[in-house]
Amino acid sequence: MGEEVNNSSEEDSSFWGVRKQYWKERFSYMNKYKQIFGRDKPLPRWTDADVEEFMQSDPVYGPQLKLTRQAAKIAATGSVIGAVSTAGVSWKYSRHGIGAILSFGAGAAFGWVFGKEIANHTLRLYKFDSMDAQLKFFEWWEKKSEGRS
């Protein structure tokens, strides 16, 4: 009787190999960011007019990008509201500057998260992957800035 052939290497079955594979699967979305940040030559800056042009030219990803940008505005609004309100309450009741500054930062973070969740549900962003729309815009912008469009 011959030995069984094991297709996986010994490293993959070790404790660290299993953990490495686990985290590789959990952070697989990071591969999408390599298209943006792993470039040799950065993309030139774009304006709101360029983004509007993309939104009108792409019937699938244009509306998705528009919703994504609206969600970012809602999240930013939530961040401002959270920061100002928590810092205001902190200042009103404690009159301590450091506490108000920390409340401002925490309120901004919490407000951003709540604003993003509100936008996610009201704009139904859960129906598509907003990162794909942004990547399509980057691909379009790369072609346009190189003069290939």
Image (cartoon, rainbow, N blue to C red):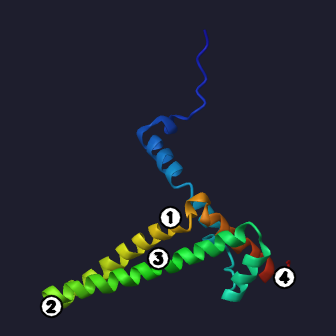
**Looking at the image, is mark 3 or mark 2 earlier in the sequence?**
3
Q: Could you tell which of marks 4 and 3 lies nearer the N-terminus?
A: 3
Q: Position of residue 110 (x, y in %)?
A: 35, 73
Secondary element at image label 4: loop
| Dot placed on the residue nearer the N-terminal end, 2 or 1 | 2
Q: Disc 2 marks which amino acid?
A: Arg
Distance from label 1 to label 4 (Cα)? 38 Å
**Residue at 53% of width from left, 49% of height from top?**
25
Sort mark 3 into few (<14), some (14-19) or many (20+) by Cα contacts within 10 Å. Answer: many
The secondary structure type at the circle numbered 2 is loop
Q: Which residue is at 41% across, 79% downward?
A: 78
Amino acid type, residue under disc 1 in the picture: His
As displayed, is residue 118 above or below residue 94?
above
- Quadrant (top left, top right, bottom left, bottom right) of the N terminus: top right
Identity, as a three-letter code, of the amino acid under mark 3: Ala
Cβ–Cβ below 8 Å for labels 4 and 3? Answer: no
Q: Which residue is mark 3?
A: 75
